[in-house]
Amino acid sequence: MTAHMTTLKVGDQVVDLPVKEGAIGPAVVDIGKLYGQTGMFTYDPGFTSTASCESKITYIDGDEGVLLYRGYPIEQLAEHGDFLETCYLLLYGELPTPTQKSDFDYRVTRHTMVHEQMMRFFQGFRRDAHPMAVMVASVGALSAFYHDSTDISDPYQRMVASMRMIAKMPTLASMAFKYSIGQPFVYPKNDLDYTSNFLRMCFAVPCEEYKVNPVLSRALDRIFILHADHEQNASTSTVRLAGSSGANPFACIAAGIACLWGPAHGGANEAALQMLQEIGSVDNIPKYIAKAKDKNDPFRLMGFGHRVYKNYDPRAKIMQKTCHEVLNELGIKDDPLLDVAVELERIALSDSYFIEKKLYPNIDFYSGITLKAMGFPTDMFTVLFALARTVGWIAQWKEMIEDPSQRIGRPRQLYTGEPARDYVPMAQRR
């Protein structure tokens, strides 16, 4: 990282500020000493123009539609690799050798079981509890079951906690799913790969054998890769902020899951599916397109455009192909939702209104249809997102803990409330 200086004029005062340049992407102005030199803060609601940290993990170029994990294009990783290889890459910075991959897979697989007392913990929830509520609670509770890996100053304990969360998240997610539909929990099997194991834990029942469909397993594995990390988004920033206080890693990931639950973040694919169901058929599309273009109409097209990507979401291209593979494998050729989705996509890529506003289909547009076809109810969509994003959260948390420049997060504010005033006794108030 190279640096040079720029100047900022504040009233009659000229302040020299360092400008830092990364490997790729925009340079940043270091304003760390701005308050000390001028008595002023910067104002940036949503932190959209603020770099909160230095990171080597993920790079996004929203204008060009680029997503890189440790420098590798997402398209190549999704096409040629598997999810655990991506996990290794995000955690350690390089693709694993065959020996490293075999060892990593073994370590994750041998950590997939959860403490048996977790079964009783689940029984405390209402049977109709939302699976995301169950995930927030159960992941936070891991620190009570595995308190031998909560010392964040110990690199070995950090590693063990990381392995445990990557390994146990599918088990907890499948337990949340089974609990919500009233079926018995299914234990993991060590002879299955990560994603096949998860599918079996979700859809197997004790009364018959379950055979994992390799097409569905590969599709879900690709979905996990696409969601594994996405730079400093809301939930990742939450994990980093929670971790900056020294909180244990299980609590930090639980905080990330809570943030992800929001419909503007992890719930977007569920919202996109609900929108397709509301439209109902291709015949209704013109009416809804007109509503979307009407500024006075509250209707909004979900699954189009992205906070970061001002071009086509690179993950959406992979997800589109994956979606068709799943529907073909399951023999779903006349799905009205897919017909609506395909026609909406065609319009979005050709209509001048969408092109000018850069409302391209995003990953949520396709992933909702795909997950529904695989048999997951909509309230599980965000749980799957959390499962996939866990490795990104852990990699970001680990990077933050090991960064000597990081301090406890403490954003400032522009105070617009009442100025100082004296307390008025009750008898004198009117």
Image: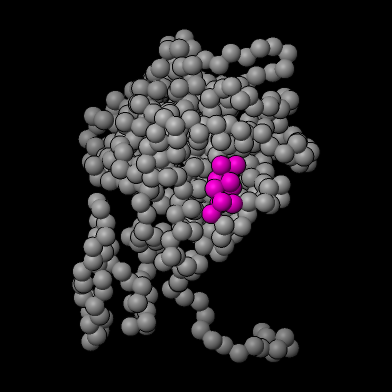
Quadrant hosting residue 296? top left
Q: Is residue 332 visible?
A: no
Q: Observer-nearest residue: 389 or 86?
A: 86
Magenta region's main secondary structure?
helix
The quadrant of the picture occupied by the C terminus is bottom right
Magenta region: 155-164
Q: In the rendered view, how is the structure colored?
A: one colour
What is the x, y in percent for residue 353? 25, 37
The quadrant of the picture occupied by the N terminus is bottom left
Which residue: 49% across, 53% down? Answer: 397
Q: Is residue 168 visible?
A: yes
Q: Observer-nearest residue: 225 or 148?
A: 148
What is the x, y in percent for residue 170? 59, 33
Magenta region includes residue 156: yes
Question: Left of 126 or right of it: where is 2?
Answer: left
What is the x, y in percent for residue 350? 23, 29
Looking at the picture, does residue 280 appear above or below residue 359? above
What is the x, y in percent for residue 411? 46, 68
Magenta region includes residue 391: no
Which residue: 46% across, 48% down? Answer: 395
Looking at the picture, does residue 278 appear above or below residue 428? above
Which residue: 28% across, 46% down? Answer: 61
Q: How many marks?
A: 0
Looking at the picture, does residue 366 appear above or below residue 54? above
Q: Observer-nearest residue: 140 or 374?
A: 140
Looking at the picture, does residue 112 appear above or below residue 417? above
Question: Left of 44 or right of it: where is 107?
Answer: right
Question: Left of 356 or right of it: where is 268?
Answer: right
Which residue: 47% across, 68% down? Answer: 407
